Image: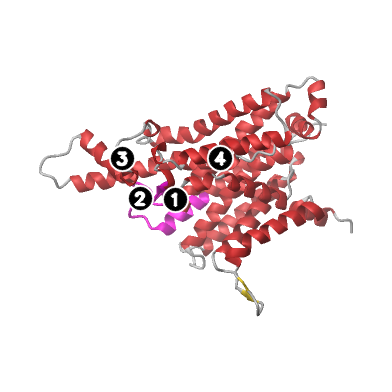
Amino acid sequence: MHRSFITRNPSVLWFLLALSLFTIGVTILSEAGIGTLSTSFVKTLGKTLCLCLIAIAMDIVWGYCGILSLGHFAFFGIGGYAIGMWLMYARTEGIVIDSLATQTIPPTPQEITDAIGNQIFGVVGSSEFPMLWAFSDSLFLQLLMVVLAPGLLALVFGWLAFRSRVTGVYLSILTQAMTLALALYLFQNDSGLRGNNGLSGLQNIPGFETTPQSTISLAFFYASALALALGYILFAWVVSGKMGSVIKAIRDDEARVRFLGYNVESYKLFVFTLTAIVSAIAGALYYPQAGIINPAEIAPIASIYLAVWVAIGGRGRLYGAVIGAAFVSLLSSWFTGGGAPAIDLGFYTIQWTDWWLVLLGVSFVAVTLFFPKGIGGLFDYLVRKPS
C-alpha cells in the first residue's frame, strides 16, 4: 500500500513543530518582545540555524550517500561571498553618492564607479573592479550567483571525480585539496575579493540604514528558520522512496548497485551538487548576520568541524545533524566567548578559550568509539525503548 510522504517521514512534522515553537519563543524573548535576548544572541541563534542547514546537507552527502566531503564549507563560503559582494557594493555606492552630492559639478557615472572601486579595493592597493564584480550592482544577479557559482563548481568537480570512480579517503582528500586551493587563492590580494581583509560591514543592509539592528537580526532569524524548514523537507523527500533507497544502497555497497544497472555516478553527482547549492544558500544567510567573511572561513578545517558536528549529532539522521550542529556551535560560542568559567586546579588554570578544541576533539573520538550513532541515536533509543 502506498504511504504518504509524512507517514514515511514522521520526523518532519515533529521537526517543523519544534522549529516553529523555537521561532515563536525567540520572537517573544527578543528585544522586539520582552527584551530578554540581546540582539547579538538573536544573531547567534540565526547563524546557528544556518549551520544546522549546512549540517543537514553534509549528512545527506556523507551519512546517506557515503561521500565524506571535506569541502562543503567552501560552498558555504562561496554563497557568503556572492551576497557579500552586492552588500558591499550597494552600501558603498550610497556612501559615495552622498559624499559627492555636495560638489558644484555633478559627478559622472564613471567618477562614481571609480570612487566606489577606490573605497572597496583601496585596502589592497587597487581601485579597479575585477571581472568577478561584474554583476555586483544587481541583487537579482548576485542571488543567482549564490546558486550558480557553487552549483557549477560542484557539478564540474563531481563529474570529474565520480566518472573516474574516485571513492573513499581519496575522494575526501580531493575535496580537501579543492577547498585548500580555493582558500589560498582568496588569500591573495589580487584575487578580486580583498584578500585576507575579506568583505566586511555586511550587517549594514542597503536601504535599511535607519532600521534598528534588532529588527534586522530578527528578520534574518526568520529567513534562516524558513530556509532550514524548507531544507529539511527537501532532503527528507530526497532520502525517501526509491531515490533514498538507491542513495543509501550506494553508501552500503556501491559495486552491487552498479551491478544492478543503476547509474551510480549520476546519483552521486545529483546529491553532491544539490547539497553544495543548499550549503551556499545557508552561507548567504549566515554572513550578513556575522557581518564579515574572509578566506579563513573557507579553510579545510571548517569542513572538518562540519563532519565532527554531524558525527556527534548522529549521521544518517536529518535531525541528528541538526542536533549536532546546534549543540556544538552553541557550546563553542559559550566556551570561546568567555561564558564558561575558568577552572583553577591550583597548579594550573583551565581557560576554556584555549581548551575548547581539545574538548571537541576528545568528544568526537569518544562518540566515534563508544556511541557511533551519536546524540540522534540516543534520542532514537529513548523514544523506542520498550516500557
Tag 4: Cα neighbours inside 10 Å, few (<14), some, or many (≥20)?
Answer: many
- Observer able to see residue 371: no
Secondary structure type for disc 3: loop
Residue 320 appears anywhere in the view: yes
Q: Amino acid at mark 3?
A: Ser
Q: Which residue is mark 2?
A: 208
**Where is residue 12 drawn, in percent x and y?**
69, 45
The tag earlier along the polypeptide, 2 or 3, is: 3
Front position among marks 4 and 2: 4
Residue underneath mark 4: 180
The answer to which of 280 and 384 lies nearer the viewer is 280
Near mark 2 (Cα within 10 A), the count class, few <14, some 14-19 or many ≥20, is few
Measured in 3D between alpha carbons, the distance from the residue under mark 3 to the one under mark 4, in whole angstroms, is 25 Å
Secondary structure, mark 1, is: strand
Q: Quadrant of residue 355?
A: bottom right
Position of residue 188 relative to residue 243, above or below, is below
Residue at image mark 1: 292
The region drawn magenta spans 197-222
* Number of the front mark, 1 or 3: 3
Report the residue at 46% width, 40% height from top. 186
Q: CA distance from mark 1 to mark 3?
A: 20 Å
Q: Earlier in the sequence, mark 1 or mark 3?
A: 3
